Amino acid sequence: MRERTIKISSAGKIFSLTGWKVGLVMAAPALMKVLAKAHQYITFTTPPNLQAAVAYGLGKEDSYFEGMRADFQRSRDRFTEGLTGLGYNVLPSIGTYFLNVDIAALGESDDVDFCRRLVVENGVAAIPVSAFYDKAAVRTVVRFCFAKRDATLDAALERLAGRRKTSSAA
């Protein structure tokens, strides 16, 4: 697969530096040559200090990345368990920083409206999955980011628990 695989990634995601808009790409030399030509006309510049920082980070020992991966998996499992315990329908999640939740079982049919109310009423942010569609959007799935500290995830779960109680009473 090496000769026909391209990996495109975000340094901001890998190193938990959301504001860093620095991407990276890995590929076999023949593929990289073509990618470099395309990149020439897409991106004007990336600050050299950020490029040096990403190069430093990518040079870290494997244990750094293995630990990060284990931490994300633990956060994913923790948040999944919490949401499931609250009665949310959490869809399987592998290889991402997000959990998708099907809100149809909650009687919801408009992901945008649900996400807006979630922020206003509960102080929890989610992304309506319909935002990623050009047409024929799925309107009953929202996405939560679990790449957060335990305290942040726990606070979100507490607020979402309050929402479920409020919804059940209605």
Image (tube, grey):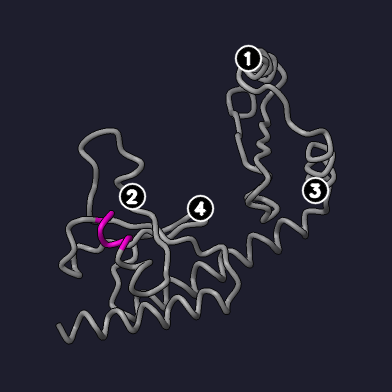
**Mark 4, mark 1: which one is toward the viewer?**
1
* x then y, percent, for residue 47: 78, 34
Image quarter (top left, top right, bottom left or bottom right) of the C terminus: bottom left
Tag of residue 96: 4
Which element type, helix, strand or loop, lies under badge 1? helix
Is 63 placed above or below 6 here? Answer: below
Report the span colored magenta: 111-116
* x then y, percent, for residue 122: 37, 75
Which element type, helix, strand or loop, lies under badge 2? helix
Q: Main secondary structure of the magenta part?
A: helix
**Mark 3, mark 2: which one is toward the viewer?**
2
The residues bearing labels 2 and 1 have C-alpha atoms spaced at a distance of: 31 Å
Residue that label 1 marks: 41
Q: Identify the mark nearer the N-term, 3 or 1.
A: 1
Is 139 placed above or below 25 here? Answer: below
Say which amino acid is labelled 4: Thr
Image quarter (top left, top right, bottom left or bottom right) of the N terminus: top right
**Residue 68 within the magenta-colored segment of the rendering:** no
The residues bearing labels 4 and 1 have C-alpha atoms spaced at a distance of: 29 Å
Say which amino acid is labelled 3: Gly
Residue that label 2 marks: 129
The residues bearing labels 3 and 4 have C-alpha atoms spaced at a distance of: 20 Å
Q: Residue at x 54, y 74 (%)?
A: 152
Q: Is residue 165 left or right of residue 75?
A: left
